[in-house]
């Protein structure tokens, strides 16, 4: 009997999801203690890999000959070498939006903490002091403008919650038009600079890519109002962190961050001194930080784990991969060959052999079998139009009933 495919869970995953995965036709191995290095030697014979924060390197993928699918139990896939996976035909999928509410909750936790200086007030009480005058200086957030950079799953959730706090949300994002902003019930800024200049609170929820790296630049802090609040629960590399530090010290910018450069993965100490900026500077600026916990609620982790199971179940039972991030949608196929044929062994292989001989590249094949199982319809997406000679050869097969060529729209 053939051994079941092995599924390796290399990070902590909600126990309910682990239980559900055990009901699928896979051999589940739960090893959350693996490190980036030990993972590199643990992928032999593994068919499906689930990771949360663990890095999946090119080196790890080089030895993973049986690997079909990597699921990131999180919002995006930056910790996975997706390019290396694509080069080996390994699907990479994620769980977009499933932890959005948890992140939005922390954003408001940080905003209110900053306005009321809750962490310092608590520490002061714990130290046996009653500093009511010091901590009774909050401004309040009602009526303030909150600028949201990035209106994806999290940015939109933040916008909804902002309204319930009586704040005025305005947004800027790659594809946010004034009409879309109106639909979301928020104001529209035509540039990030305009957004920052108009915001009492600026919160960043952009995806990290080559165009957004360092996008919260020195200039953005320069145009923010004095003593404005800046929140980063997205990615550290979106921000010029030196400029942020200057803005805290010289301009009184109050900062809440969940993410920090050089996050210690698998270690208990941090190397940055950013968190030392927790007492207000002479300008009133300070920083509160949390250790990348925005997504770490039970609710969010269950939602992420449930989505992880859905992706794997669909892959195993239906052969499709929801939320796949590395399958090209810029197909160069310009034509579709539609072939109705008798559903006999070898017919499709014969057709493909003719196509190959005529030097035509096939990008996608689907085959639908009709009731009774005697006939099927194959659809082949091909990059160039077949010659009459090629079609003639295909039509000559006894099992081929009909061949059509359809020109596809250019979606690339
Ligand atoms: N702290 C934490 O634990 C978590 C952090 N995150 C991070 O939060 C951020 C937002 O996540 P989601 O809302 O789930 O992502 P998403 O993909 O739903 O939204 C990203 C937004 O960024 C915009 N964007 C991307 N490139 C852009 C560009 N060049 N110019 C302008 N806009 C651009 C997109 O249009 C979209 O509005 C990401 O950086 C993600 O990695 C996500 C989950 C948890
Ligand atoms: O807590 C985690 O798993 C990381 C959350 C995160 O940053 C993400 O989902 O991309």
Image (cartoon, rainbow, N blue to C red):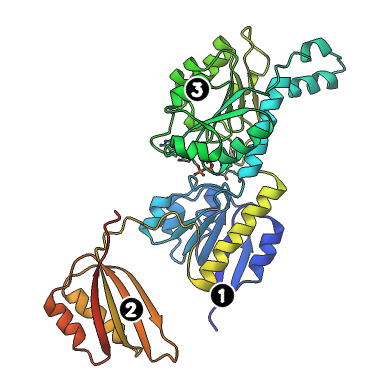
Q: Which residue is mark 3?
A: 196
Q: Nearer the viewer, mark 1 or mark 3?
A: 3
Whether residues under marks 1 and 2 lie with C-beta atoms below 8 angstroms apart, the answer is no
Residue drawn at the location 68% of the way across and 24% of the way down: 142
Using the numbered discs, state the Cα–Cα distance from disc 1 to disc 2 in whole angstroms: 30 Å
* Residue in view at x 55 percent, y 84 percent: 1
- Asked if one can make out residue 237 in the rendered structure from this viewpoint, the answer is yes
Number of residues whose C-alpha sits closer than 10 Å to that of mark 2, classed few (under 14), some (14–19) or many (20 or more) = some
Tag 2, which secondary structure?
strand
- For residue 378, the mark is 2
Left or right of 208 in this view: 389: left
**Residue 30's image quarter?**
bottom right
Quadrant of residue 400 within the rendered picture: bottom left
According to the image, label 1 marks what residue? 4
Disc 1 secondary structure class: loop
Q: Earlier in the sequence, mark 1 or mark 2?
A: 1
Q: Residue at x 17, y 79 (%)?
A: 391
| 235, above or below 22, in the image | above
Mark 3 and mark 1 in contact (Cβ < 8 Å)? no
Asked if disc 3 and disc 2 are in contact, CB closer than 8 Å, the reply is no
Q: Residue furthest top?
A: 282
């Amino acid at each position: 009997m053939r051994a079941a495919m092995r599924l390796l869970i290399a990070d902590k995953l909600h126990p309910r999801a682990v239980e559900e995965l055990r009901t699928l036709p896979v051999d589940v191995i739960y090893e959350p203690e693996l490190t980036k290095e030990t993972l590199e030697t643990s992928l032999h014979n593994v068919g499906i890999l689930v990771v949360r924060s663990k890095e999946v390197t090119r080196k790890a993928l080089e030895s993973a000959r049986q690997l079909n699918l990597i699921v990131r139990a999180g919002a995006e896939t930056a910790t996975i070498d997706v390019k290396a996976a694509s080069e080996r035909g390994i699907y990479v999928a994620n769980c977009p939006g499933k932890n959005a509410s948890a992140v939005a909750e922390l954003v408001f936790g940080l905003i209110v903490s900053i306005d009321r200086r809750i962490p310092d007030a608590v520490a002061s009480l714990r130290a046996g002091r009653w500093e009511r005058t010091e901590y009774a200086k909050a401004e309040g957030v009602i009526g303030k403008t909150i600028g949201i950079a990035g209106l994806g799953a999290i940015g939109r959730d933040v916008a909804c919650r902002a309204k319930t706090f009586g704040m005025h949300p305005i947004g800027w994002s790659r594809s946010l038009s004034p009409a879309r902003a109106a639909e979301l019930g928020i104001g529209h800024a035509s540039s990030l600079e305009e957004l920052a200049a108009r915001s009492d609170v600026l919160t960043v929820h952009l995806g990290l890519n080559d165009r957004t790296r360092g996008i919260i630049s020195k200039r953005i802090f320069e145009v923010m109002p004095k003593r404005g609040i800046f929140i980063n629960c997205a990615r550290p590399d979106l921000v010029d962190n030196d400029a942020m530090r200057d803005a805290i010290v010289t301009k009184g910018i109050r900062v809440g961050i969940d993410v920090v450069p050089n996050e210690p993965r698998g270690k208990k100490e941090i190397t940055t001194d950013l968190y030392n900026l927790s007492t207000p500077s002479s300008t009133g600026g300070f920083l509160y930080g949390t250790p990348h916990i925005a997504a770490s609620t039970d609710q969010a982790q269950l939602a992420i784990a449930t989505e992880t199971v859905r992706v794997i179940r669909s892959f195993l039972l239906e052969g499709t991969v929801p939320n796949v991030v590395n399958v090209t949608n810029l197909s160069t196929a310009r034509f579709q060959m539609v072939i109705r044929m008798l559903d006999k062994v070898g017919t499709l292989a014969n057709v493909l052999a003719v196509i190959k001989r005529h030097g035509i590249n096939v990008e996608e094949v689907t085959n639908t079998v009709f009731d009774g199982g005697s006939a099927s319809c194959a659809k082949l997406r091909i990059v160039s139009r077949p010659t009459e000679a090629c079609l003639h050869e295909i039509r000559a097969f006894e099992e081929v009933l009909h061949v059509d060529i359809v020109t596809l729209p250019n979606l690339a």
